[in-house]
C-alpha cells in the first residue's frame, strides 16, 4: 500500500493522495443519502440477531488507500470503492455501515479482540491471516512495484530489487515478500534488499519522491491509481496475484454469509460492477465471493 510526494495537484487530487489522517467515522459517499436502516431490506433477516435491532455497525478501515478508501476534501466523508460497496451492502442488509479510521496493522488485532466485527480496507486474503480472521473475497488483486518513470524498466518485478532500498507499509503482505526475496538474492550471490517499513501509504510515496528509497512494493490496483495522480511515478504489472477480502472476526459465520449474499445481490443488480467502474478498476471484478478463498 502507498502514495504521494512532491507533486503539483489540484485541491481535489491532493485530497486523494494526501487524505486526512484523522481518526473519524465516515458516512455514505453521497452526502444526501438517507440513513439505510431498514428492517424490510432484502437481507436484513440474514444479519445476526444482535445486529438486526441496531441502526448501524462501525467497521475498521485504514482510510488512506485510494481508490479503495480515502477522505473527501472535508477530511470527514469517506470515498472510494469500499465505501461504494458498503453503500450497496447497506441497501441489501438494511443497516448503516460507518468507517472508523485506524492503522492498517491494528485492524486484525481489533477484530481478534472483539472491538470490531468487520473491516473493509483492501486487505489481502492469505493463509497466515486466516489463522486470526475470516475473509469474504471481493476483488482480484496483485502485488507490484512502484518506481519513478526513469526506473520503470529497471524495476518491474520483485526479482529486480536485489541491492536496492524498497519502501513497504507496515502490516502488508509486501513486508514478508521483500524479506523472502532478499534471502533469494543472497542465495544467488547478489546484494540483499534493504526494506524500510513505513506506517502508511502516504509515507512510502513521499519516501520515493524524496529519493529515500529506490522503489515501493505495494498492491498494484491502488498503486496504479496513486501513480495516475502523481507526475513521474509508474506502477508495474502485478508480479503476484491474490484476492482482497472484507475481513471478519473469527466465528462471525452469520455476518459473513449475510455479506456474501449481499455481494451476490449487488453482482446481480450491477451495483458491484459500477463501484469498480467508478474508479477504473473493473478489471479486478470477480464472479463469486468465496469465504477464505486465499490459498497462499
Image (tube, rainbow, N blue to C red):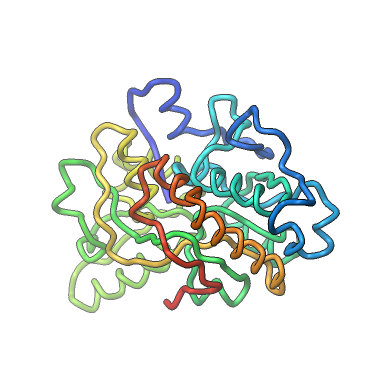
Q: Depth check: give the residue in front, 237 or 89.
A: 89
Q: Depth check: give the residue in front, 245 or 216.
A: 245
Image: 182 above or below 104: below
Is residue 226 found left or right of 154 in the rendered image?
right
Location of residue 182 in the rendering, given as x and y in whole percent from the top left corner = 30, 69
Q: Depth check: give the residue in front, 146 or 195.
A: 146
- How many marks the image carries: the answer is 0
Location of residue 60 in the rendering, given as x and y in whole percent from the top left corner = 65, 52
Quarter of the image where one finds residue 72: top right
Image: 195 above or below 231: below
Q: Residue furthest top?
A: 10
Image: 113 above or below 42: below
Is residue 116 found left or right of 229 in the rendered image?
right
Considering the image in quadrants, where does the C terminus appear? bottom left
Residue at the spot 68% in from the left edge and 67% down from the top edge: 249
Location of residue 122 in the rendering, given as x and y in whole percent from the top left corner = 50, 55
Residue at the spot 80% in from the left edge and 47% down from the top edge: 55
Quarter of the image where one finds residue 112: bottom right
Residue at the spot 25% in from the left edge and 56% down from the top edge: 237
Residue at the spot 27% in from the left edge and 66% down from the top edge: 192
Image: 226 above or below 158: above
Location of residue 57 in the rendering, given as x and y in whole percent from the top left corner = 74, 51
Amino acid at each position: 500500500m502507498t502514495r504521494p510526494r512532491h507533486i503539483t495537484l489540484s485541491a481535489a487530487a491532493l485530497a486523494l493522495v494526501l487524505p486526512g489522517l484523522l481518526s473519524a467515522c465516515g458516512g455514505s459517499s453521497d452526502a444526501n443519502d438517507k440513513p439505510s436502516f431498514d428492517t424490510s431490506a432484502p437481507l436484513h433477516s440474514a444479519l445476526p440477531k444482535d445486529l438486526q435491532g441496531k441502526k448501524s455497525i462501525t467497521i475498521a478501515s485504514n482510510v488512506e488507500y485510494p481508490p479503495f478508501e480515502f477522505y473527501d476534501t472535508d477530511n470527514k466523508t469517506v470515498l472510494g470503492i469500499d465505501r461504494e460497496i458498503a453503500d450497496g451492502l447497506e441497501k441489501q442488509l438494511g443497516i448503516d455501515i460507518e468507517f472508523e479510521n485506524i492503522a492498517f496493522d491494528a485492524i486484525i488485532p481489533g477484530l481478534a479482540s472483539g472491538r470490531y466485527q468487520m473491516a473493509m480496507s483492501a486487505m489481502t486474503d492469505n493463509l497466515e491471516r486466516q489463522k486470526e480472521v475470516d475473509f469474504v473475497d471481493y476483488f482480484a488483486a496483485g502485488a507490484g512495484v512502484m518506481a519513478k518513470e526513469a526506473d520503470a524498466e529497471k524495476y518491474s518485478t520483485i526479482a529486480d530489487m536485489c541491492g536496492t532500498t524498497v519502501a513497504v507499509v507496515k502490516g502488508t503482505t509486501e513486508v514478508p515478500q521483500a524479506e523472502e526475496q532478499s534471502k533469494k538474492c543472497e542465495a544467488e550471490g547478489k546484494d540483499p534488499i534493504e526494506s524500510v517499513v513505513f506506517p502508511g501509504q502516504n509515507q512510502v510515496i513521499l519516501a520515493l519522491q524524496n529519493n529515500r528509497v529506490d522503489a515501493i512494493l505495494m498492491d498494484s490496483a491502488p498503486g496504479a491509481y496513486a501513480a495516475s495522480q502523481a507526475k513521474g511515478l509508474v506502477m508495474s504489472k502485478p508480479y503476484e496475484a491474490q484476492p482482497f477480502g472484507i475481513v471478519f472476526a473469527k466465528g462471525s459465520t452469520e455476518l459473513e454469509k449475510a455479506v456474501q449474499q449481499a455481494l451476490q445481490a449487488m453482482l446481480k443488480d450491477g451495483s458491484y460492477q459500477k463501484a469498480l467502474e467508478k474508479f477504473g478498476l473493473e478489471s479486478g471484478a470477480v464472479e463469486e465471493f468465496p469465504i477464505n478463498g486465499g490459498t497462499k
